[in-house]
Amino acid sequence: MLVQSRPLRLAAHAIRNAQPLPGRTPVLEGGETGCPGVGFGPAVFVKDDSDMDSFPEGGVLVARRSSPTFIRLMSKTSAIVTDVGSTTGHMASLAREFRVPTLLNTKAATQTIPHGAIITVDATNCFVYEGEVAELLEGSHKTTESEDGRGWRQTSPAFQLLEKVIALISPLNLTEPGSAAFSPENCVTLHDLARFVHEKSYREMFMMGDNVGDLRGAAYKLDVFLPIDLYIVDLGGGVTGTPKHQKLKRSQIASMPLSALLTGMLHKKIPRFGPRPMDVSGLLSVMLRHATTSPEADSTFRDPCYAMISDKYTNFTARVGYHFSVVDTYCGETQNKNYISLLFQGGAADFVRRTRRTRAMADILKEHGFSVDLKRDLISARLSKGTREETVKQLEMLGSLLQFFRQMDAAMANDDAVVLFRDAFLRGDYGLEELTRR
């Protein structure tokens, strides 16, 4: 086991001023100090990687959730404020190394801080003020050696030795898991090695449902009105009662995340069977692909779908014809453990129509706060650190999204269709009644 440990360096700031500055009304108060200090600048909301490319020097990073990917901006940002996050999380540790004033778990930063407004972040006392607060900035300074308890470093042989080898332990070079540089050859520190192993092992777990082989003999078939054969593998606590004849009723699903996904898929306004609307060109593109690829010869075209579940965990893998999707999720009481990961690819129509569908889906996911990576007709999306209630709600949305866009690639006749179907989903017009009336 490789264990990373860093001092919190918060002892000197444990006693906080509970009152805001006289004559000043904070726009936000509360939260947890990730790294003490004061910073000011324009509030810049960061939702995904594309927002980081244009982040201005000296801006205050405001985000829904903390993320270690923000290390890319820590040399530019004057402070960080998030709705959700933990002082013991990876990003907080990085912020302390970079000495970036960081305020976490404020619950409402993205709702109360005006985008683009000049703000002053007092991360030590957990206040955010509008405008530049000179008295705070004048009194702030970087933590000194004596303040964070490291004044003995010059006299400690152990610390002097650590200073010599720290360059091989602490720096993180592998910051982008999706880049070509994220490889074993570029692991030059123990931090890089830990990050690489973590990302790759997670990836294997994420694709677990696609690698299990044929488990129908050891699984329960879910008796539900959906156009898939879904088999359930109970990892513990995911099923109640004693299923009869290896068949499982929906009421016997005790897994909170799978139950939420099914609720979304079974939304009464979404057609569960039958073709989606398409034009003649869309129909021809489906027929041409079917004729040229002979999908019935591929065993994966006929493979069942699996959900490996526990009471708080679900790995749902669905390969339906040309469509492939994976949802890997944990949903429990501990907010910092909760996450939803999605992989979606494929379709029966031509490549252009498939990419239009993924564009519409990506826009919807971004609107719901997901971090999205879109490449051609492949979507990778992730949402982390939501409350149990928020995670359940997002899983219901995701279930509806997957069912709503089933076979919808053939309906993507032009770029206008991307906007039409995206907006229909966002306003809850799952049955397309409003579009039909036009």
Image: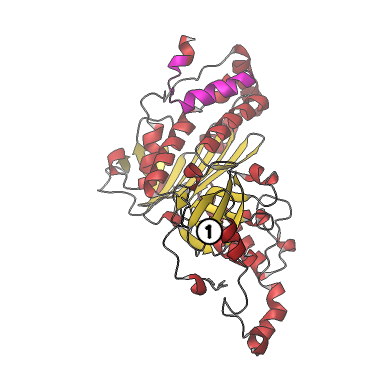
Answer left or right for 190 relative to 126.
right
Which is nearer the eye, 123 or 210?
123
Predominant secondary structure in magenta? Answer: helix
Rendering coords of residue 414 (x, y %): 64, 19
Of 382 and 296, which appears nearest the observer? 382
Q: Residue 431 lies in magenta, yes or no?
A: yes
Point out the stretch of residues depicted in magenta.
414-434
Examine the image and state in which quarter residue 140 appears: bottom right
Q: Where, quadrant-wise, is the N terminus in this rendering? A: bottom right
Judge by depth and name the residue closer to the eye, 185 or 434: 434
Q: Secondary structure at mark 1?
A: strand
Q: Please state if 405 lies on the left or on the right of 234 as rendered.
A: right
Classify mark 1: residues with Cα within 10 Å, few (<14), some (14-19) or many (20+): many
Q: Position of residue 347 (x, y in %)?
A: 59, 29
Is residue 416 covered in magenta?
yes
Q: In this figure, what is the number of numbered marks?
A: 1
Outermost residue to the front: 23
Residue furthest to the top in view is 438
Colour convention:
secondary structure
Residue 259, placed above or below residue 338: above
> Can residue 319 be seen at all in this image of the molecule?
yes
Residue visible at 66% across and 70% down in the picture: 170
Q: Where on the picture, by quarter, is residue 345?
A: top right
The location of residue 356, given as percent across then percent down, is 62, 27
Q: Residue at x 67, y 81 (%)?
A: 162
Residue 91 can be seen in this image: no
Q: Amino acid at mark 1?
A: Asp
Residue 79 % position (x, y): 60, 56
Residue holding disc 1: 122
